[in-house]
Structure formats: C-alpha cells, structure tokens
Amino acid sequence: MLARLQILSMGLMTAIALGWAGVWWHLGAPLVALSGAAVVATAFLWVLSLQFVLMALTNRAHHVPREGVAIVLKAWAVEVLTAICVFGWRQPFRSRAVADVPGRPGQRGIVFIHGYVCNRGIWNPWLRWCAREGVPCTAVNLEPVFSSLDAYSPIVDRAVREMQASTGLAPLIVCHSMGGLVARHWLATATAASSRAHHIITIGSPHHGTWLARLSRTINSRQMRLRSHWVSTLAAGEARRHALFTCFYSHCDNIVFPAEVATLRQADNRRVRGVAHVAMAYHPEVRNEVARQLARDTVAAEAAALK
C-alpha cells in the first residue's frame, strides 16, 4: 500500500512540475518555467530543511546539547541522499526485491520493524547483510499505513512466532522510529512476550513522542505526539522491561526531537554523533551492536563448553 502511495505521489509531483514548465514555456517565460519546475521537483529538500530548523529550535528550548554547524550540515547532506534512496527507490520500487532469510534450528534470527510512512524496503541493505552472514531474518510491513499503533502488534507477534518456530530461539528485534513503539506495545500486550524477545534495539524511536508529530493528523502520528495519552499509557503499563532495550538516538535527528525522547530510563541508551533520522538506521554503530547481540549466543556456548 505504501509503495503505491509513494509511486503515486512521485508521479503527481512530476506531472505538476512538467505542467508548470510547459505552460510558462508556452507563454514565453522560460525562466519562470524552469525555476518553478525546480522548486516543485525539490520540494522534499525544503521540507527536510524545515525539519532541521525545527529540530534545532526544539532541542535548544529543551536545553539539549547542540552539535556544531558543520556537523549538522553534514548530517543534512547525508540525510538528503539517504532519503532519496529510501523514499525514491527502495520503498516504492524495491520493497519486495530482497527476500527474508529462512530460519534454521539453533541460529538466532532477527525481526525488523520499520517506522512511520515506511515499509520493509528500508531494510534492504540489512536483509542483504543477513543473507551474506547467514543470519535468519524477516522484515514486516505495518499496514494499514495510517492505522492505530495498537493494530500492528498482531503483525509483530506473527513474525516473532514464525521466526522462533523455525529457529527454536527468541529473535533479536530491530526497530526504526515508530517501530520501537510498536515493539513496546507488542511486548506489553502479547502473551509471554518478554521470553520471546532476545533483545530489542530501537533506532531513533519516539519513546516519549516527538514534537514533529503535532504537524500531522493521522491516527498513528497523533499517538506519537510529545507526551501523548497513548505514549503515557504505554509507559504506565510496562513492568520495567526497559533493561531489554538498547536505544540509539541522535542530537541531529530531524524527526524525533527533542533528542531525549528517543531514550528509555533503564535502557542502554547510545548517542550517535552527527547523523539524522533515516541515515541512523544504517549507521555502523547500530550494525556493530546487532552483531554483538547475535554473538552473545556463541560466547555463552563457548563458556558453557569450557565448564
């Protein structure tokens, strides 16, 4: 569903840009034609830039330590390229291009959970990595796209059950953005969920909501507003499971801010320097932590053998 929506939106933007250019060119104003088309074609750059401005202002208001201008500008440039790749290619056209890796008995797997206005295509580089390393994995699609966050728990539960059934082990759960809230809701509501998750890694997840969500009107974005009723209720219902989490966050996150909302009090919180929201999903520190969590089984097995 999301892939179709993104293809449709890209087609609409292209039609508007070409229509503007065609009309003004015909009227004898080539400069207006080209400049207007360029503005339409690069609209996402203006939106992304506005997000960074709002992030900086909000972090300052909440006394969050600020990154240097050069670091923020670099984060913006990398995020532009990453967003083009993810939202212009992987998600609309390649969401089914990379298959899940089937589970094998005794080999711990990974369940990947994407974020808001995303689909499994965002995990394509991860799925290729898992295939190279021989790590079982599955990447879910959270649909309907703009549904309540509560509605996604059965999707996660099914993926976890299937992975555990094929490997005999509780999977590692890796979540980007909204996916972290979905995982927490599943953990709080599913039967024996704590024993069915090896560990949960969240990447730029709005655990306490995000300021930016106030600009959207969808059901799930309203639930992700800063200190929303949904977020507060979720936190109140958790039986201090935060030790099961590693939370990656950044002071350059242009979607989830102020920065501290991406942390949990009793979790292993890891600050990633100079990286924005989508790019954080591919950061080497995140990859290293995933590999470390998977290696815990090997270390434990070797220790047991020595005894």
Image (cartoon, grey):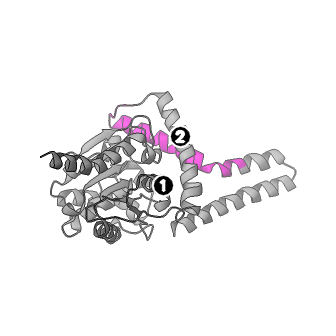
Range covered by the magenta-colored residues = 38-66
Camera sees residue 59: yes
Which mark lies nearer to you, 2 or 1?
1
Residue 164 located left or right of residue 116 = left
Question: Circle 1 is placed at which residue position?
Answer: 128
Camera sees residue 257: no
Residue sitting nearer the eye, 31 or 251: 251
How far across and down, in percent of the image, does residue 261 sit? 31, 46
Residue sitting nearer the eye, 210 or 191: 191
How far across and down, in percent of the image, does residue 72 sit? 48, 33
Secondary structure mainly formed by the magenta segment: helix
Q: Amino acid at mark 1?
A: Arg
Q: Is residue 40 magenta?
A: yes
Please, what secondary structure does the residue beneath circle 1 have? helix
Please, what secondary structure does the residue beneath circle 2 have? helix
Residue 77 located left or right of residue 147 = right
Residue 228 located left or right of residue 100 = left
Residue at left offset 44%, top offset 39%: 275
